[in-house]
Amino acid sequence: MGYKRPVYLLHFEDEQFEGLEIRCRGASIGQVAGLMDLASLAGKEDDFSKEDLESLELLWRVFAGCPVDCNWPHEDQGGNCYVSKIKEWNLEDEDDVLVPADYAGFMAQDLAFQMAVAFSWLDGVLGTPGELGKGLTSGGPSPEVSIPMEALSPALVS
């Protein structure tokens, strides 16, 4: 039995996504490097330039895979199309039908949902730290706090 790369469980801070579970594959270092500039688009949902939209389209393809009729050259993929990073999710439509965890299912969602999911995935892939959790602190006390500061006894000074 060999090693399998980890699957990321996405986390969302917004209450509107409570109960949503999405498990995703990671990205290659080349894909991550190509997506680093997209962090500037987070929270910018109303005023996209043409370049921003092209960057979002690349993010959608890297994250959700390519559509069946994709004709991009994909130099970073050796000419191959992107495969969906979405392994599984529990997203249902208004009729309680499970939405396919693929490019078509992802692209059928509104922009705010797409942005939240894609940026949560980038957070997981890039390893940005989240909260430490209950009972954990940012570390122990500073070393100088725990060093005794009393004057040495005369017998130890010589």
Image (cartoon, grey):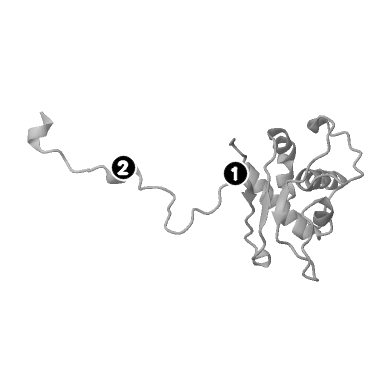
Q: Say which of 18 and 130 sits in front.
A: 18
Rendered image quadrant of residue 38:
top right
Q: Which residue is drawn at 42% across and 58% down?
A: 135
Q: Earlier in the sequence, mark 1 or mark 2?
A: 1
Q: Residue at x 73, y 46 (%)?
A: 85
Q: Mark 2 points at which residue?
A: 144
Tag shown at residue 127: 1
**What amino acid is found at the position of numbered circle 1 in the picture?**
Gly
Looking at the picture, how far across and down is residue 43, in whole percent?
72, 55
Taking the view exactly as shown, the residue that stands out farthest to the left is 155
Crowd class of label 1 (few under 14; some 14 to 19; many from 20; radius 10 Å): few
As displayed, is residue 95 above or below residue 29?
A: below
Residue 35 lies left or right of residue 10; in this view the side is right
- The quarter of the picture where the N terminus appears is top right
Q: Is there any visible trace of residue 30 in the rendered image?
A: yes
**What amino acid is found at the position of numbered circle 2 in the picture?**
Glu
Crowd class of label 2 (few under 14; some 14 to 19; many from 20; radius 10 Å): few
Looking at the picture, how far across and down is residue 123, in whole percent?
64, 48
Q: Say which of 146 and 64 sits in front.
A: 64
Looking at the picture, how far across and down is residue 33, in whole percent?
71, 35
Q: Say which of 21 and 129 sits in front.
A: 21
- The quarter of the picture where the C terminus appears is top left
Residue 70 lies left or right of residue 157; in this view the side is right
Q: Nearer the viewer, mark 1 or mark 2?
A: 1
